[in-house]
Amino acid sequence: MYYQDILKPNQEAVWARVANDTPLRYPELRRFLLFGFGDAAGLENRKEDTGSAYELAQTAIAAELLAAHAAQPNVPVVFLAQSLGCQVLSSYLYDAQKAAAGLPVVAGIWKDVDAWSLRTLGRRLGADERAFLAGGTCSALLTTGCVSIVGQRGYLADEILLESVQPGVDNRQSVERTLGRPSFVGQFGEPVWYYVSSSTTQAPNASRIGPQRPPGMPHLAHRSIWSFSMPSKAPGASGALAASTAIRRSPPSPSTSQPRSLAVPACAVVRSPSSAPA
């Protein structure tokens, strides 16, 4: 069942008026906003009115359920909703539950289901039809989304702060004040501070109301490693850490899947995209 055809004619009319009356600099972007984000607003606009988009979307759901009930009375129903359709179906079932409990419903077919059925079907619904339309034989409800889950692990990188570290100017104290403590510090040779950041993505999965949910494994989309080699002694000094010793920069290293120590006092950025799981 699709409800887009209920909303699209008015969207086309609005688009025509806007396009004819107002010069648009970004027509494709505005069209995307209207057709993509305008659905939710269109469903809620004056939804209390008879024949509103909100009611027509619920009518489309009811029509499919009535057809299923006519073919096989009281057949178990599995509801599957996608994206904004999750809200449409949720509102439909919630309104049905409120009506069954004798609570007021302000919009949609369940505002007055008898009046709706007389207006739409030319008759009143039977008790079994009314219960079926309210989801009385629902055996499962599945919802899906269209947005990936993005996760951030490790150091929360700020490109502006990272780029602000200047060779010949910054030292340990200033780097720590700017970037915070490193993820870890090298244990051999010249001290090296490592800042490690990983981003993961998890593709949209169906989620099911019930005892089990389909597993979803995060996928490592990007890993970045910033390494800063800090001289432990100032030139000509004897023993103590040189708080004012400046760091020097070497050219960035090529992309690699492993962090790399630098042979000279330096700060360098090593970006290492990887498809391997974190």
Image: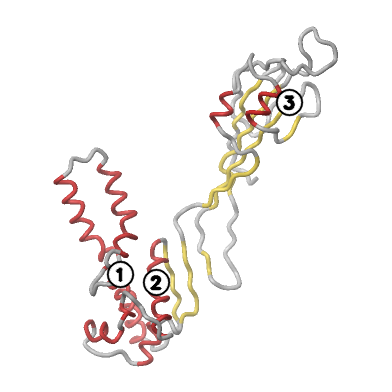
Residue wearing tag 2: 91
Quadrant of the snapshot with the N terminus: bottom left
Considering every residue shown, the one lying at the far bottom of the view is: 127
Q: Which residue is found at the position 28% from the left and 52% from the top? A: 34
Q: Where is residue 59 in the image (x, y as percent from the top left)?
A: 29, 76
Residue wearing tag 3: 192
Considering every residue shown, the one lying at the far left of the view is: 20
Q: Earlier in the sequence, mark 3 or mark 2?
A: 2
Q: Which amino acid does label 2 sit on?
A: Ser
The residues tagged by marks 3 and 2 sit, at their Cα atoms, a distance apart of 57 Å
Residue at disc 1, secondary structure: helix
Q: Residues within 10 Å of mark 1 (few under 14, many from 20)?
A: many
Residue at disc 3, secondary structure: strand
Instruction: Indicate whether 194 appears above or below 234.
Output: below
Q: How crowded is mark 3: few (under 14 residues within 10 Å), some or many (20 or more)?
A: many
Q: Give the image quarter of residue 263.
A: top right
Q: Give the image quarter of residue 136.
A: bottom left
Residue wearing tag 1: 54
Q: Do the residues labelled 2 and 1 touch (CB within 8 Å)?
A: yes
77 relative position to 175: left or right: left
Q: Earlier in the sequence, mark 1 or mark 3?
A: 1
